[in-house]
């Protein structure tokens, strides 16, 4: 039904022609399969970071593994500049915030293809496992020239492995892979967990196939209580989660380039209780998420100085949420479902004019549709864009400039207004010596109102008081625009440690926000509206070192976010921003035993719950550690970990008296992990 509906749309024919053109000449829009791996030299800065004009943070495969991360959300928590807010009562998703800009303002991609967001605005990063990830690239600040809408705060590109280390051999079929089995146990609540994951690569000189899959099961902890009015009630004290994921990529690689066909499927089911007092303990929330994606990547080389790459991909997302109150005469239930179907195509030309000048230009088109129980009919939107960016180096590459611009156009569909947006960019990097890099970047960002913000009717009827409301979409919303400035200095000091210090300022016009338009009604009535202006500003400091057997990294981030209230004629703090954030990670290879010890910690200050109020969340503090030992020529690894070592210790309770454990729905006590990872290769 979805496909037939798409073909009936009047814009699909032209879009299909664009997609066909992209497939013939395309590949991944960011990182090439044959790009060099990151190299670290003791004599100068990390190569990839120092040579990048814009500041990029890299989370490597090794760092992901040492942190004990199971999902991309877990892996990003060790970066000070990114706040990953833990899922709390009534919300199954984690949210990502960069530079004070949260859900819908940070573009998250897998190999350059945008990850579908849910209908509450969050990108389901808890659905993306870390298996088969080569690295994660994070770019701070508006990156709209290359990545378009929804990248006002920054962009996160998840790069997957596409080849094996021995894939270039001519010795016939090569097979390699890995299998991970991890058991987790929480003694305080006698609760087991299980994580099973594997990868398999098979291929030869030209043809190869890469498969990655995982199953993550967290059973949750059920408890029984008695209420004088409702009687016996059984509820989840901790969230139950079941996540299944599989991604397969078939690649043909030759002298002319490469072409890859890929597909993925993810299924997630969560059950939790969104209230924890009285008979409402029986109010159980169910979240079901399904993601499917398939597409074609390709690269065609015309010579030493020119090639084309791009992709064409279809994405489907389904979400069903419901609540069920099982409390005697108070029993009730409700559910909603929504789905989206997108088709995106992107083609880019890379032209090395000379040794110090590289030009990138291309086209992008994205056809989106959305439907569900809250929509009267399927809604459509089409975004098209042309972009260009040049990298120019002067004075033996001591100074580099990156000018760029993007033009976006959205035609009228289903009575919507025509939208046009032009966004420029200019980045400058100065390297006075091989140990120092200074960067200054200006970028204009924008965010077009989503179909959800324009048409969704969201009934939030499972919370008391002001939490019981109806949120209406607004088809007259205008696109948000931002001006972003980032500055940074990065320095390698005496080859012992490296530090970076940076600051940013974002000015947002026509910010889209949920506004109360009728507070007296029951339920309360809210609507998406444009707020005249908002600002975010702050900075980050990070320091890292790598000695013979020791690696250490620490960071601090300050974030301020405010919007202007026309009625009060004053600036007010925006809600749900972490003002202060600290991260620390260490790794040490124990002599003689040759066993690796690693630990990581993070602290988030309290967050304002609602603008114009004095209601705050508790702060958040977490410490995890692990030991790992490799055997059998490093083919077998055994590791032991402990999470939540401080047993939810923190410093400040929330305004309503909730501690960290209760507010974020965390488990009581330390969680122990025992895992085995086997690597195979012929």
Image: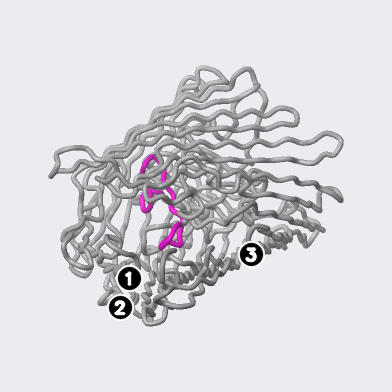
Q: Nearer the viewer, mark 3 or mark 1?
A: 3
Q: CA distance from mark 2 to mark 3?
A: 37 Å
Q: Which residues are magenta?
A: 88-106
Across and down, in percent, residue 586 comes to: 65, 35
First-in-chain label (3 vs 1): 1
Q: Main secondary structure of the magenta part?
A: loop
Q: Is residue 81 left or right of residue 645?
A: left
Residue 214 - label: 3
Write the residue at 64% across / 49% down.
Answer: 643
Residue 12 - label: 1
Report the coloring of the rendering: one colour
Dots 2 and 3: beta carbons under 8 Å? no
Near-viewer residue (400 or 201) = 201
Near-viewer residue (435 or 349) = 435
Q: Is residue 141 left or right of residue 112?
A: left
Q: Which residue was labeled with disc 2? A: 8
What is the crowding at mark 3: few (fewer than 14 residues within 10 Å), some, or many (at least 20)? many
Across and down, in percent, residue 86 comes to: 48, 53
């Amino acid at each position: 039904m979805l496909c037939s509906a798409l073909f009936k749309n009047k814009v699909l024919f032209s879009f299909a022609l664009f997609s066909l053109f992209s497939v013939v000449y395309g590949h991944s829009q960011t990182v090439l399969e044959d790009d060099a791996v990151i190299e670290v030299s003791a004599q100068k800065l990390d190569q990839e970071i120092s040579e990048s004009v814009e500041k990029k943070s890299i989370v490597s495969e090794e760092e992901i593994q040492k942190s004990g991360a199971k999902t991309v959300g877990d892996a990003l928590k060790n970066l000070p500049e990114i706040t990953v807010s833990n899922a709390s009562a009534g919300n199954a998703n984690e949210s990502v915030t960069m530079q004070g800009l949260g859900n819908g303002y940070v573009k998250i991609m897998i190999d350059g293809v945008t990850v579908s967001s849910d209908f509450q605005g969050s990108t389901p990063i808890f659905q993306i496992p870390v298996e088969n990830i080569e690295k994660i690239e994070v770019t701070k600040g508006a990156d709209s020239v290359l990545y378009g809408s929804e990248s006002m705060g920054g962009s996160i590109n998840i790069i997957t492995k596409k080849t094996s280390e021995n894939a270039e051999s001519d010795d016939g079929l090569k097979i390699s892979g890995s299998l991970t089995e991890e058991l987790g146990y929480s003694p305080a609540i006698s609760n087991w967990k299980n994580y099973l994951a594997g990868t398999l690569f098979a291929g030869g000189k030209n043809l190869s196939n890469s498969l990655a899959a995982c199953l993550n099961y967290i059973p949750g902890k059920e408890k029984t209580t008695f209420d004088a009015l409702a009687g016996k009630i059984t509820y989840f004290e901790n969230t139950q989660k079941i996540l299944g994921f599989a991604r397969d990529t078939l690649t043909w690689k030759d002298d002319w380039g490469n072409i890859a066909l890929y597909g993925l499927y993810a299924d997630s089911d969560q059950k939790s209780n969104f209230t924890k007092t009285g008979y409402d303990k029986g109010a159980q929330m169910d979240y079901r998420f399904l993601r499917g994606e398939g597409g074609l990547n390709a690269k065609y080389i015309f010579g030493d100085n020119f090639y084309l790459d791009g992709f064409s991909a279809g994405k489907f997302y389904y979400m069903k949420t419901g609540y069920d109150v099982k409390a005697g005469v108070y029993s009730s239930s409700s559910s909603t479902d929504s789905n989206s179907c997108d088709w995106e195509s992107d083609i880019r030309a890379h032209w090395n004019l000379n040794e110090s000048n590289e030009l990138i230009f291309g086209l992008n088109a994205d056809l989106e549709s959305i439907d569900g129980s809250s929509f009267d009919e399927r809604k459509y939107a089409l975004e098209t864009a042309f972009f260009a960016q040049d990298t120019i180096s002067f004075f033996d590459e001591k100074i580099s400039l990156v000018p760029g611009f993007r033009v976006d156009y959205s035609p009228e569909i289903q009575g919507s207004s025509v939208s046009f947006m032009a966004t420029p960019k200019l980045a400058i990097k100065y390297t006075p010596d091989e140990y120092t890099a200074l960067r200054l970047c200006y970028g204009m960002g924008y965010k077009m109102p989503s179909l959800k913000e324009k048409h969704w009717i969201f009934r939030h009827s499972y919370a008391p008081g002001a939490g019981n409301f109806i949120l209406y979409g607004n088809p007259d919303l205008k696109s948000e625009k931002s001006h972003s400035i980032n500055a940074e200095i990065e320095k390698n000091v005496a080859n012992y440690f490296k530090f970076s210090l940076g600051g940013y300022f974002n000015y947002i016009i026509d910010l889209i926000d949920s506004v109360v338009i009728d507070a007296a009604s029951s339920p309360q009535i809210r609507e998406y509206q444009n707020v005249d202006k908002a600002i975010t500003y702050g900075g980050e400091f990070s320091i890292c070192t790598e000695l013979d057997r020791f690696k250490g990294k620490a960071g601090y981030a300050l974030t301020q976010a405010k919007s202007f209230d026309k009625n009060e004629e004053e600036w007010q703090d925006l809600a749900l921003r972490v003002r202060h954030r600290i991260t620390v990670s260490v790794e040490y290879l124990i002599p003689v035993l040759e066993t690796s010890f690693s630990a990581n910690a993070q602290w988030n200050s309290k967050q304002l719950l609602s603008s114009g109020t004095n209601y705050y969340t508790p702060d958040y503090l977490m410490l995890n550690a692990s030991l790992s030992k490799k055997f059998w020529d490093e083919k077998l690894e055994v590791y032991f970990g402990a999470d939540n070592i401080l047993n939810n210790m923190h410093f400040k309770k929330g305004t309503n008296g909730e501690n960290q454990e209760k507010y974020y729905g965390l488990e009581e006590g330390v969680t122990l992990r025992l895992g085995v990872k086997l690597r195979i290769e012929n």
